[in-house]
Image (cartoon, rainbow, N blue to C red):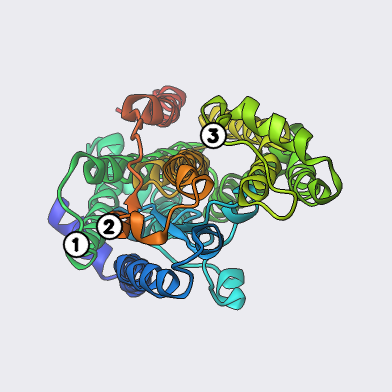
Amino acid sequence: MYPLLIKHFFRSKTVWLAFGILMFLGVLSISTGKQFLNQKQATIAKTAEQQQKHIETQTKLYEDDIGLLLYYLKFSFVNPVQPLAGISMGQSDVNSHIQNVSILNLEGQKYDTDLVNPMRLQVGNLDISFLIIFLFPLIIIALSFNILSEEKEKGTWKMITTQGISSFKFLLKKLSIRVVFIYIVLSILLLLSKIILGIPFTINFLYIVIVSYLYVLFWFSLCFFIILLRRSSNSNAIILLSCWLILVVFLPVLVNNYVANTYPVEEAFAMTIKQRDAYHTKWDTDKKATMEKFYNHYPQFRKYQLTETGFSWLWYYAMQQMGDDESKVERDAMFDKIKKREELSASIAQFFPPLQVQLSMNSIANTGLSNHIAFLHETTNFHEDIRLQLYPKIFENQPASSVNWQEYKPIFFKPQHSFNILKSVFSLLLLTLILIGLGVFRNLKYFR
């Protein structure tokens, strides 16, 4: 029976068309991921060289005035791109992976992004995760929607039931051929991704495979449930396509709007204005008041007193510091809102597999918003370390040659990976089992 069903399956033009579409778009998405990784890795690789040249150039120009030198000098903090980002780019194509910051006020420097063609960003990138989440369900629907209704409409179903063949086993055999076919195509694409993108066989890559396989199984279970409603082929196709439209297109938009309206981030604009005002108004503020706030922030620098009547680098960098300090409330409130958005999105996504899989893949590949926020937080710590090292040099008016500039190389961010595979796949697996169970239970009377 199996060989005959397999022959019949591969004689269908739909099967070969589906295979061609998946392979063509799969190779295209892998190529897109490779280009993305090459671009990011090339930029990161040049960072060390460019920083060294930048330091050498600026120290020659301003060797006699370290305060002026550090006004221009920038230091690089890098968020490295993992090869898995080629599978799931997430938001990493719009977020900067390199923060080049000076010791001036930080908040105005944090949100600079890479120079990327805006038309390309508008179109978006095709990666493997997009293919799995959006296209694979459509192919599964196209291959599976009529495996029972077609037999009934052609009049062959009664022939099967009268020959003593278990109709339930027959249906499972037909469905299993499609499951194996889709899994083989998915495995080929994941294997090609691993080879072409240079992904090491780590636990994170295994998580991507597990999540992908379970997502495909969920769509087969949904098809299985709809098929066992025993409706016509047209009805099955309409119901399944409606499910795809709701789960993959409509609900993500609805959830995004709900999350954005639940936690509006007005603090982003307020923080920008506050940071700029806090800095610019200090030109007309009593210098002693500015210095007192600076000393409260850094008691260890109180020994450096403002004695000059004219311009002073001590006062200037204290003024710059106030831009960050006086916008701290708005900054903390903004990040708190963003964190709540992430938590709410994750909670809602548990009930909608496409959202859950997308968030899971982004988390595994470190390409989601949470990774970028963590990177920005560490940028603040990096910036603070640089300030604490160089402030005394400025305040003591030491020559630029007193600093060993060779020590200042790009620092790499080390993300804390906290992906929980059991928590991420539990709801997906539960929904799959419920759909299979309901389908079988509803049709016990039909199958021997």
Label 2 close to label 1 by CB (< 8 Å): yes
Mark 3 and mark 2: Cα distance apart in space: 25 Å
* Residue 173 locus on image (x, y percent): 24, 45
User: Which numbered dot is residue 83?
Assistant: 2
Asked which secondary structure carries label 3, the reply is: helix
* Residue 7 locus on image (x, y percent): 19, 64
Query: Residue under circle 3?
Result: 349
Relative to 49, say whether 101 is above or below: above
Answer left or right for 1 relative to 222: left
Q: Which residue is painted at 66% across and 40% down in the image? A: 306
Chain-order first, disc 2 or disc 1: 2
State the quadrant of the C terminus.
Answer: top left
Mark 1 and mark 3: Cα distance apart in space: 30 Å
Query: Residue under circle 1?
Result: 198
- Which is more toward the observer, 72 or 370? 72
Going by the numbered disc 3, the residue's amino acid type is Ala
Chain-order first, disc 3 or disc 2: 2
* Residue 302 locus on image (x, y percent): 58, 29
Asked which secondary structure carries label 2, the reply is: helix
